[in-house]
Image (cartoon, grey):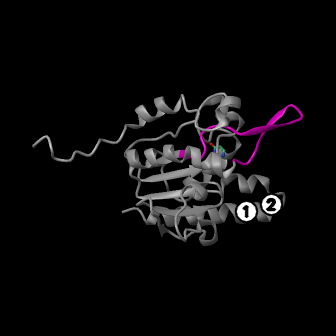
Amino acid sequence: MSDASPRRARPATLGQLRKRATHCTACPLYARATQTVFGVGAASATLMLVGEQPGDREDIEGRPFVGPAETLLARALHDAGIERQSCYITNAVKHFKWGLLGKRRIHKTPAQREIDACRHWLLAELEAVRPQVLVCLGAIAPKAVRGRGFRLMRQRGQVLDTELGVRALATLHPSAGLRMIEPRQRTRALAMLIADLKRARRRRR
Ligand code: URA
């Protein structure tokens, strides 16, 4: 190979990315968070699940989906016939944005500029994993996986092409069920999530 031939840089490994993200100060959220919560899972994962942002527990433990939403996510994955080992799980925003309610730290919705500042990590994770389908859990991830005419939440449950070169589907966030008071609504939200995850599973090659 001549020196002039173009060489494509190898994508960074997940380990390298995780290490680099530890020092991320791309938006002010890092200042009030305990740590960066990077994605978890194997580079060989076929599904990438993208949540919103770490919650209180995730911020302390440094892993996505270990708090109250985890139980529902685990149940939905199980009922959809998806093994957790086949998933890479991450968030659109990697630092916890919070406010105080009494003594409790409660989640505050990240602004678009914070989602944008974090987007390069999601793109790097996508490059390292190259999943067959990306599943956006809730309304924040579609704002990171944006693109012309891409209206994921309006097209909930549909597997769509994106300009990121990966097919994506948006569905309800597992916590949506937790916030619903009516048991019937909770059951319905969970059923929707399971149906959408099944659709994503079938679209894997
Ligand atoms: N909700 C999310 O969107 N992500 C987490 O990691 C935890 C709760």
> SS for tag 2?
helix
* Residue type highlighted by circle 2: Pro
Label pair 2/1, CB-CB below 8 angstroms? yes
Residue 139 image position (x, y, % from top left): 66, 58
Marks 2/1: CA distance?
6 Å
> SS for tag 1?
helix
Mark 1 neighbour class, 10 Å CA radius: few under 14, some 14 to 19, many 20 or more: few
Query: Based on the displayed image, in which of its 4 quarters is residue 9 positioned?
Result: top left
Q: Which mark is residue 183?
A: 2
Residue at 49% from the left image edge and 54% from the top image edge? 82
- Assess mark 1: CB under 8 A from ligand 1? no
Count of labels shown? 2
Residue 47 image position (x, y, % from top left): 46, 54
Residue 172 image position (x, y, % from top left): 65, 60
Given residues 22 and 204, the one toward you in this image is 22
Query: Based on the displayed image, in which of its 4 quarters is residue 205 positioned?
Result: bottom left
Regarding ligand 1, which quadrant of the image does it lie in? top right
Query: Based on the displayed image, in which of its 4 quarters is residue 144 positioned?
Result: bottom right
Q: Is residue 16 magenta?
A: no
Which residue, given by chain and number where applicable, does mark 1 sit on? 187
* Residue type highlighted by circle 1: Thr
Residue at 63% from the left image edge and 37% from the top image edge? 95
Q: Which mark is residue 119?
A: none
Q: Residue furthest left?
A: 1
Residue at 65% from the left image edge and 52% from the top image edge? 112
Q: Is residue 60 above or below residue 138?
A: above
Q: Residue furthest right?
A: 102
Where does the N terminus fall, quadrant-wise? Answer: top left
Q: Is residue 97 magenta?
A: yes
**As drawn, is 189 to the left or to the right of 79?**
right
Magenta stretch: give its range. Answer: 90-110
